[in-house]
Amino acid sequence: MSAFRAHGRGHLDGPVVILGTGLLGASIGLGLRGRGVPVFLFDTSPTNQAVAVDIGAGRPLEELDGPPQLVVVAAPPDVTAQVVEKALADYPESVVVDIASVKAGIQAELRERGVDLSRYVGTHPMAGREKSGPVAARGELFTSMPWVICPTEETGAAALQVARSLAGDLGAIVSQFTADEHDEAVALVSHLPQIMSSLLASRLQGTPLHALSLAGNGLRDTTRIAASDPTLWVQILGGNAEKVVNILHGVREDLNRLIGTLESPLAPGARLDLAQLISEGNAGQARIPGKHGGPPQAYSWLTILVDDKPGQIARLLTEIGEVGVNVEDLRLDHSSGQNVGMVELSVLPNKHDLLVEALTDRGWRVLQ
């Protein structure tokens, strides 16, 4: 099955039952409630369920009267197939979807259990936060984010449409893959980044604080996701181990190549090999889609020094808007030892000089 991308069509009427009120389950509830869809919640943790109810993600499941239109299984990956099987049996008139981050293993387990898959759709919303639990839930979490739909060969057209409507109602962009295509893709674009970030961050454990004081945005950017929940990632990596291992074999080859080169950095061809390594990274990074999922696009960056006091960043962005330049990306950092912040902005290349001149004329300190 070839992949395609589109906005979800149609809308859910509900009711919707959500089994699992962690970050994603509670966020789905908040998003659907915001559209007026009736939502009912259940979690094996009474505390998580109570918190999700308190923040407005839905009502307790025992208040449901009648069959739901949709059941969303938001359980951990290692028990997802079991919960899906039970949901299909408990709600024989309802569509059942799961939102686990691995798909092929769950489909295989459901087939081994002899489950009728005509009302089941595997899905994966590609959204999240470093924080977990219903307290971290946000109704807008899925807005403009990819949501992968992985129907089985047995999935009925009506069930597929309900799954697409769920993603569409939450503002996500729908992509359709086979389960194997999905698992292979997320192994590279999601699971490998987590591994590399965690491996890098683990090297910091015994680092003296005076050395860490030199850290800038490069280290912060590459270790941000290292703060993720270990329990969840044990299940994700275990569930997609085969696909991840295949990629890690390639990473190991690249590391061995780099180690061999750096062991003799002045040997003939060593500098060329290092340049090729960085160039290959340049080429790969340039293939990452740009804003709104569009084609990759190069931007120009500039840094503006701002006083570290209230209102400065707001004033800067207001004045950039008055100049008529759109900010494509923004990062914040602080200067070590000085009471100033550094705002890094990216803009379209043809707006770079205009913005530098305009901000300089307005008294801002601009570094190019």
Image: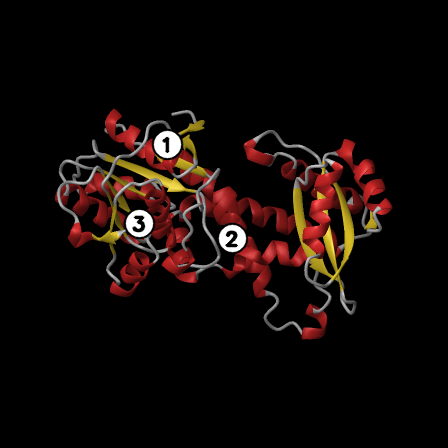
Image depth: mark 3 or mark 1 in front: 3
Tell me which numbered mark, 1 or 2, is placed earlier along the sequence: 1
Callout 3: SS: loop
Q: Amino acid at mark 3?
A: Ala
Residue in the image at 85% along x and 41% along y:
357
Residue 2: percent from left, percent from top: 42, 25
The spot of residue 362 in percent (x, y) is 83, 47
Q: Is residue 254 left or right of residue 12?
A: right
Front of the two marks 2 and 3: 3
Which amino acid type is shown beneath numbered disc 1?
Thr
The front one of 243 and 217 is 217
Query: Which quadrant would the N terminus be assigned to in this image?
Result: top left
Mark identifier at residue 194: 2
Mark 3 or 1, nearer chain start: 3
Q: Please say if the residues under marks 3 and 1 sit with CB atoms less than 8 Å apart.
A: no
Look at mark 1 in the image and give the residue it sits on: 178
Distance between the alpha carbons at the discs numbered 1 and 2: 23 Å
Q: Seen in the image, is 171 located left or right of residue 346?
A: left
Colour setup of the view: secondary structure
Residue 125, percent from left and from top: 40, 42
Q: Residues within 10 Å of mark 3 (few under 14, many from 20)?
A: many
